[in-house]
Amino acid sequence: MQNLSYTNIVLALLILYVVIKRQLEPRTVKFKPEFFIIVILFGIASVGDAVNKQHLDVSQSNIYVFGILSVISAAIFAALRAWSYKFWLDDDGLVMREGNWLTIVWWIIGIGMHVAVDQMWNKSSVTLLLYLGITLLIQRGLVWYRASSKYPKEISANITAQQKDQDRHSKRRERRRDRHER
């Protein structure tokens, strides 16, 4: 189980580095949950592996209590980070967002608390990826909600830009697939 715990820590640190770096840069507000759902699925697989193959020894009631508290913690810290964002319109009329030093503080406190409780609960970090996926998904949803509330008319330009990006990526994938099929 120690290897699984180390793997989760390394993956979580990599994800955190990329996510925090991006949260501190001015970015267009988008709602694309796919990446976070993948992280959640990896987290579920990690916990399942720890329970089934590594024989993580926890009672079912402990799993429910820890799970509920983890989701509540993930939601609270996601909300605090989303609240710390600044929103504005760029020259193209797109709603932009940017985190700040408070965003980092909420990350440090939230992750620190989760890792500490995880260590006390099961002496590992097998739930870290799951926690990250959930908290990031909630944060993204709350950022979208705040931006939509502040700029209800202008957010439609973000939706259009996001759809154009998705169409461009789909066409690129189709061209690659066509080249490989030849």
Image (cartoon, helix red, strand yellow):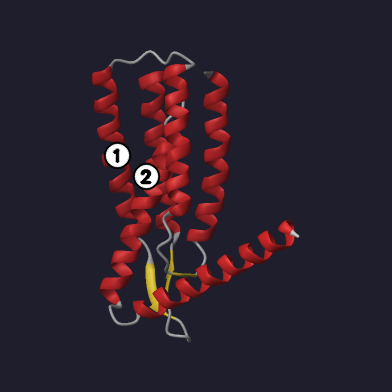
What SS does tag 2 mark?
helix
Is 78 or 67 nearer to us in this picture? 67
- Calculate the distance from the C-alpha at mark 1 to the C-alpha at mark 2: 7 Å
Q: Is residue 28 above or below residue 66?
A: below
Q: Can residue 39 be seen from the camera position used here? A: yes
- Residue 120, located in which quarter of the rendered image? top left
- Residue 102, located in which quarter of the rendered image? bottom left
Q: Is residue 155 left or right of residue 108?
A: left
Seen from this angle, which residue lies furthest front? Answer: 182
Q: x and y percent of residue 175 in the render?
A: 67, 66
Q: Which mark is residue 71?
A: 1
Q: Is residue 85 above or below residue 40?
A: below
Q: Which mark is residue 134?
A: 2
What SS does tag 1 mark?
helix
- Which residue is depicted at the point 29% across and 15% down? 59
- Which residue is depicted at the point 47% across and 23% down? 49
Q: x and y percent of residue 113 in the render?
A: 37, 35
Is 7 or 84 nearer to us in this picture? 7
Q: Can residue 83 be seen from the camera position used here? A: no
Q: Is residue 16 left or right of residue 137?
A: right
Q: Is residue 51 left or right of residue 8?
A: left
- Residue 88, located in which quarter of the rendered image? bottom left
- Which residue is depicted at the point 73% across and 57% down? 180
Q: Which mark is residue 48?
A: none
Looking at the picture, which amino acid does disc 1 mark? Val
